[in-house]
Amino acid sequence: MRQQIERPEQFDLPGMTEELSDQDRIGSVYTMSGEDVERLRKTKPKKLGIRCNRSECDQDLHCFLPPGGAGVNAPGPCRACGANLVDWDAMSIRELQDAHKKFEVLKVEWIRHFFFHVPITSRIDAYARNKGVKGLADVAEHQLTQGKMLRFNSTWDFNQTKMLDGTIVHWARHAVACCCRKCMAYWHNVPVSSNLTESDIDYFRQLVVLYIKDRIPDLQDEPLARVPTGNSHYAERKAS
Ligand SMILES: [Zn+2]
Ligand SMILES: [Zn+2]
């Protein structure tokens, strides 16, 4: 039997880990261009400093991952500076009319803030328009109903959702904290000990859609008639 022990590299305190001097380490998302996103998308996120436990508290970008790991301890203040900025009870109330208030709270965590602001590149935009809002919602639902999301597994949790190299759906999932079971646990009070329910999946799907509409406001519900994919073929309209 595998014991569910957190892997230490996931829970090192910010500033105490390796590769901080790497030239590719991202300073601020505000200085990133779409070109940077595409140039760096194949670089390991950790090398870029895109990690769940990063904080830049002096810029009001914190990390609320509970010490000891989500699902073990209840969330509280920032693990780096101790600032108490999140009303956790309010976060777990599933009222979609409050979603934008929740987005503002999510943005005080470094990793969420990054994905709320990372520039939309032409690759990301084309994928989104090829699917349309409805197609992207289907993709989100498909991702959330895979076994690695339905059930918590400590071996790969925290690593199962693409970052820069993903699509707008992956970016949405990091931003709204449904990228992995640990983030769902501390941000949305979804216990790692139980399987995701239909209601969980429906809620996250809707948060993903709201994020996407914020990032690409003129995105249509239906796929565009055709968006070039780089060769003579055009993407099929059906979301798959
Ligand atoms: Zn902090
Ligand atoms: Zn996560």
Image: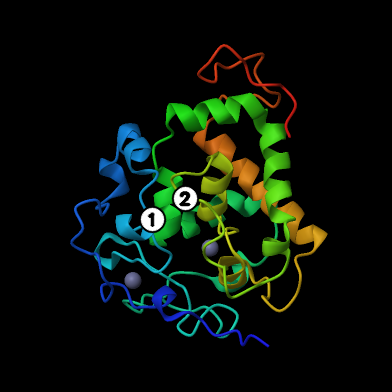
- Determine the image quadrant of residue 41: top left
* Label annotation for residue 163: 2
Task: Locate the C terminus and report the quarter of the image it occupies.
Answer: top right
SS assignment at label 2: loop
How crowded pointer 2 is (Cα within 10 Å; few <14, some 14-19, many 20+) is rated as many
Left of 109 or right of it: where is 23? Answer: left
Up/down of 167 relative to 149, above or below: above
SS assignment at label 1: helix
> In the rendering, at what x and y percent does residue 177 appear?
56, 59
The amino acid pointed to by label 2 is Met
- Determine the image quadrant of residue 12: bottom left
Q: Are marks 2 and 1 in contact (CB under 8 Å)?
A: yes
Q: Which residue shows up at 61% across the image and 72% down it?
A: 185
The alpha-carbon separation of the residues under discs 2 and 1 comes to 7 Å
> In the rendering, at what x and y percent does residue 76 appear?
48, 79
28 and 94: which one is in front? 28
The amino acid pointed to by label 1 is Pro
* Label annotation for residue 45: 1
Left of 44 or right of it: where is 72? Answer: right
Q: Which residue shows up at 45% across the image and 72% down it?
A: 64
